[in-house]
Image (cartoon, rainbow, N blue to C red):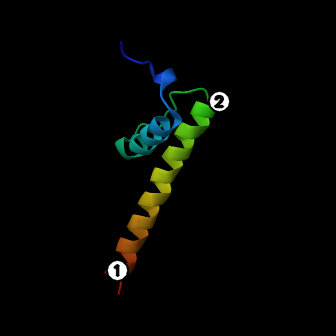
């Protein structure tokens, strides 16, 4: 028996949001105002800020 996306532990939902950022999946598959929707968004945002930090550090190193 496989679990549906609505039965995933919150850590897995965070990770899914993080991976979705890098895959370019911009749509939250969960209702926005639910705990799962917020957790997905938190993972997606973490992916964004991690990527921004990475790109900024590469840019800074390039200009030194």
SS label for mark 1? helix
x then y, percent, for residue 31: 60, 26
Q: How far is mark 2 from mark 1, CA to CA?
A: 41 Å
x then y, percent, for residue 53: 45, 66
Residue plotted at (67% across, 31% down): 33
x then y, percent, for residue 56: 43, 70
x then y, percent, for residue 17: 46, 40
Crowdedness of circle 2 by 10 Å Cα count: few (<14), some, many (20+)?
Answer: few
| Camera-nearest label, 2 or 1 | 2
Q: Nearer the viewer, residue 63 or 14?
A: 14
Instruction: Identify the image quadrant of the N terminus.
Output: top left
SS label for mark 2? loop
Q: Mark 1 highlights which residue?
A: 61
**Mark 2 near mark 1, Cβ–Cβ under 8 Å?**
no
Q: Mark 2 highlights which residue?
A: 34
Q: Report the label total.
A: 2
Crowdedness of circle 1 by 10 Å Cα count: few (<14), some, many (20+)?
Answer: few
Position of 1 relative to 11 (above/below):
above
Residue plotted at (57% across, 39% down): 39
Residue plotted at (45% across, 51% down): 47
Residue lying furthest top in this view? 1
Residue plotted at (50% across, 45% down): 43
Residue lying furthest right in this view? 33
Residue lying furthest left in this view? 62
Rendered image quadrant of residue 64: bottom left
Q: Nearer the viewer, residue 62 or 48?
A: 48
- Reading the chain from its start, which is encountered first: label 2 or label 1? 2
Position of 16 relative to 48 (above/below):
above
């Amino acid at each position: 028996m496989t679990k549906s996306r609505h039965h995933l532990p919150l850590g897995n939902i965070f990770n899914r949001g993080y991976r979705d950022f890098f895959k370019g999946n911009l749509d939250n598959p969960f209702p926005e105002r639910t705990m799962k929707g917020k957790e997905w968004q938190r993972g997606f945002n973490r992916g964004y800020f991690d990527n921004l930090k990475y790109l900024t550090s590469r840019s800074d190193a390039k200009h030194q």
